[in-house]
Amino acid sequence: MERISWNQYFMAQSHLLALRSTCTRLAVGATIVRDKRIIAGGYNGSIAGGEHCMDEGCYVIDNHCVRTIHAEMNAILQCAKFGVPTSDAEIYVTHFPCLQCCKAIIQAGIKTVYYAQDYKNHPYGIELFEKAGVKTVQVEAEKVSFDESRQEKHDFIEELMNELEKNGTNQELLKAYKEKKDKLFNP
Ligand SMILES: [Zn+2]
Ligand SMILES: [Zn+2]
């Protein structure tokens, strides 16, 4: 059994949160962590009780959806709402934060931004992060398997392949199958 790293674990949480996004322009998730504990999470969506972009369409002004509160802001505001300190915390985001969120992250005292993918990384945002001593770290997604019957599937395919070999299936085809199988199970 392989143990998932903290970075992969917290980033997976942000990817999961992104699936809750209601703004159709971009699905983003953010997780705030302190001392290896999740203290808040957020996703791209409208104010509580407001209409959703996915129902009403986005409210676009100057090419921005003004209805949406960004995932990072939602996570920070959740801390504000419940009085949870964000000083010296870390944030895991699915996309590099926009300029407004960069500023909010700095003001909240967050010290490290882990992000999965670049997204129109704003040069001024990067500059502000550098000035404020906020570290940015890209976290590459590893394939994490939640498949409970993975071993059974693996064994079943092996069994089928052994049968194929016994029945004289041509070697080239067998080799191609084996490569496919290895790719599936050893990413
Ligand atoms: Zn929207
Ligand atoms: Zn933002």
Image (tube, helix red, strand yellow):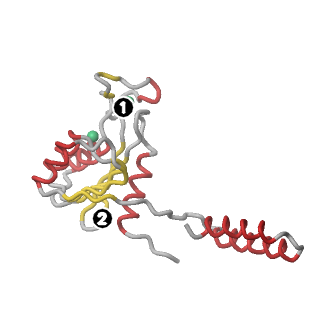
C-beta proximity under 8 Å, tags 2 and 1: no
Tell me the SS state at disc 2.
strand
Quarter-wise, where is residue 174 in the image? bottom right
Kindly identify the residue that appears in the image at 26 percent across and 47 percent down.
78
Q: Is residue 18 above or below residue 4?
A: above
Q: Position of residue 73 (x, y in %)?
A: 25, 43
Which label number is shown at residue 49? Answer: 1
Q: Residues within 10 Å of mark 2 (few under 14, many from 20)?
A: few
Q: Earlier in the sequence, mark 2 or mark 1?
A: 2
Please name whichever residue, 113 or 42, is drawn nearer the observer in this view of the structure.
113
154 left or right of 40 in image: right
43 left or right of 135 in image: right
Q: Residues within 10 Å of mark 1 (few under 14, many from 20)?
A: few
Q: Amino acid at mark 2?
A: Arg
Which residue is the extreme one toward the right? 167
Which label number is shown at residue 37? Answer: 2
Q: Is residue 139 above or below residue 164?
A: above
